[in-house]
């Protein structure tokens, strides 16, 4: 079953042609790594998937819904497709636990006890169960990013998009974040699209590697073909 489908998609910023004729299908459960030079359109591409950027031409179908259709409910798309940013964007004046519980409570109207249990389970999963009552500023960047991932998972999305999730981190924190992401990738039900320079991540858990340049997809290979040239 396909989770994300681009058909002849074009995206412009004014006169600048940022996505050039993108055709791409990502099936449910795939882990896809997107690489390419700075400015090649990677961030733009993943931001179109949850409607942070609009497309001008073509068709973009996410979880069975056509994003070009004005009637499409973007809130429903964002419930199903989470996003993790380079800068973690935690709510600075809320505790770690509250950061995770807020959206499920408001958007999903989740029962408070079940919400808290899931939040604590997720904190445990990202190795930060002992930090629940802290404020974001009390945590390191790597810890904050793991909280941001837990917060996305709390919405129980079908797909997660990652936009350079480790590039703002000090080197010694990168592995802790990558290990959490690898753990999610190995849970085969989650669809993941990851913009990253971390080739070790791609080698270990991706099934596909896509290379973009100048707003185009130039390579779309299985991991085996990409790394071994077979
Ligand atoms: P990447 O993620 O590969 O670095 P981006 O998708 O961020 O690339 O950017 C692709 C190109 O589009 C770049 O030239 C960038 O400057 C431009 N761009 C990105 N966002 C905007 C915007 N909101 N307005 C105008 N140009 C933009
Ligand atoms: P990051 O690398 O953290 O994603 P960027 O500097 O690429 O941050 O972009 C930050 C914001 O500025 C994004 O919302 C992006 O769309 C916008 N942006 C990027 N390039 C341009 C540009 N050339 N003109 C206008 N906005 C841009």
Image (tube, helix red, strand yellow):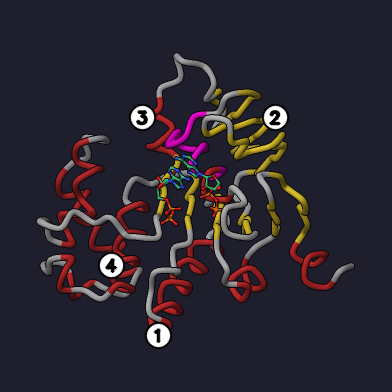
Q: Residue at x 70, y 40 (%)?
A: 24
SS under mark 3: helix
Bin the neighbour count of mark 1 within 10 Å (Cα to Cα): few under 14, some 14-19, many 20 and up. Answer: few
Which segment did they paint magenta?
A: 45-54
Residue at the disc numbered 2: 7
**From what the image shows, is residue 114 above or below residue 120?**
above
Mark 4 or mark 2: name the one nearer the start of the chain.
Answer: 2
Query: Spatial distance from mark 4 to mark 2, Cα to Cα?
Result: 36 Å
Q: How many marks?
A: 4
Q: Position of residue 5 (x, y in %)?
A: 65, 34
Whichever of labels 3 and 2 marks the residue nearer the N terminus, that label is: 2
- Mark 1 sits on what residue? 172
Quadrant into which the C terminus falls: bottom right
Q: Are marks 3 and 4 in contact (CB under 8 Å)?
A: no
Mark 3 highlights which residue? 75
Is residue 165 part of the magenta span, yes or no? no
| Residue occupying image coordinates x 28% and y 67% | 144
């Amino acid at each position: 079953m396909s989770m994300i489908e681009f058909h002849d998609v074009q995206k412009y910023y004014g006169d600048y042609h940022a996505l050039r004729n993108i055709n791409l299908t990502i099936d449910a459960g795939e882990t896809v790594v997107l690489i390419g030079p700075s400015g090649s359109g990677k961030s733009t591409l993943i931001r179109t998937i949850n409607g942070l950027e609009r497309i001008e031409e073509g068709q973009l179908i996410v979880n069975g819904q056509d994003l070009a259709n004005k009637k499409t409910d973007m809130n429903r798309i964002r419930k199903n497709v989470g996003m993790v940013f380079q800068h973690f964007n935690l709510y600075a004046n809320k505790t770690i636990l509250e950061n995770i519980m807020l959206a499920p409570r408001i958007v999903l109207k989740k029962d408070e006890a079940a919400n808290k249990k899931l939040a604590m389970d997720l904190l445990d999963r990202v190795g930060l169960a002992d930090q629940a009552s802290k404020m974001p500023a009390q945590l390191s960047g790597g810890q904050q990013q793991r909280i941001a991932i837990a917060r996305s998972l709390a919405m129980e999305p079908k797909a997660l998009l990652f936009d350079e999730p480790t590039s703002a981190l000090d080197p010694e924190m990168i592995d802790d974040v990558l290990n959490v992401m690898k753990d999610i990738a190995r849970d085969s039900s989650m669809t993941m699209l990851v913009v990253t320079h971390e080739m070790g991540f791609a080698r270990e858990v991706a099934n596909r590697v896509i290379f973009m340049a100048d707003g185009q997809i130039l390579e779309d290979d299985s991991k085996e073909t990409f790394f071994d040239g077979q």
